[in-house]
Amino acid sequence: MTWTARLTNKLTLPYDIDWQTNLNYRGPSEDAQNNRRGVFSTNLAFSKDLFKEKASIAFNVKDVFNTTFYSNNITADTFTAYQEIQFRGGRIFNLAFTYRFNKKKTRTRRWL
């Protein structure tokens, strides 16, 4: 059995810059063969509307502290093993520019 927690926060900074933080944690778990370590990750995003909301620029970072890796001790009758997995790329940066041609900005709830 394990547990998870997620905290998401969105703030508007000066100059109407939106800042969103997303914290995720999956607690440790244990079963008959596996003993898994807890996993923590942090994502950040910043965005700014431009040209009377006809355009937006957004910057986000996934896994800010490069801590999202899975660790597992495997125990069976005939062997024991230790495993660590971190997906390729680790920390990921993204910069996006969006221009809306003849279309108003839609206000939707966005997650990282």
Image (tube, rainbow, N blue to C red):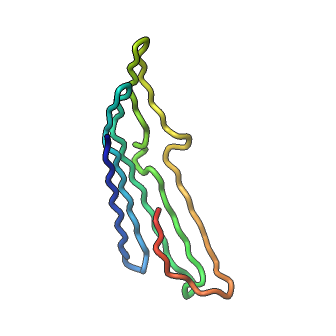
Residue visible at 34% across and 67% down? Answer: 9
Residue visible at 33% across and 50% down? Answer: 4
Left or right? Give the position of 58 relative to 41. Answer: right
Q: Quadrant of residue 30?
A: top left
Q: Position of residue 18 (x, y in %)?
A: 42, 73
| Foreground pick, 5 / 63 | 5
Q: Is residue 93 above or below residue 70?
A: below
Q: Quadrant of residue 29?
A: top left
Q: How many marks?
A: 0
Left or right? Give the position of 42 relative to 55. Answer: left
| Foreground pick, 7 / 67 | 7
Left or right? Give the position of 27 relative to 56. Answer: left
Q: Position of residue 28 (x, y in %)?
A: 31, 38
| Foreground pick, 92 / 68 | 68
Q: Is residue 77 above or below residue 44?
A: above
| Foreground pick, 103 / 35 | 35
Q: Position of residue 10 (x, y in %)?
A: 37, 70
Quadrant assignment for the N terminus: top left
Q: Position of residue 110 (x, y in %)?
A: 48, 70
Q: Is residue 3 above or below residue 72?
A: below
Q: Is residue 89 above or below residue 7?
A: above
- Residue that lies at the very extreme toward the right in this rendered image: 101
- Residue that lies at the very extreme toward the top in this rendered image: 78
Residue visible at 37% across and 76% down? Answer: 12
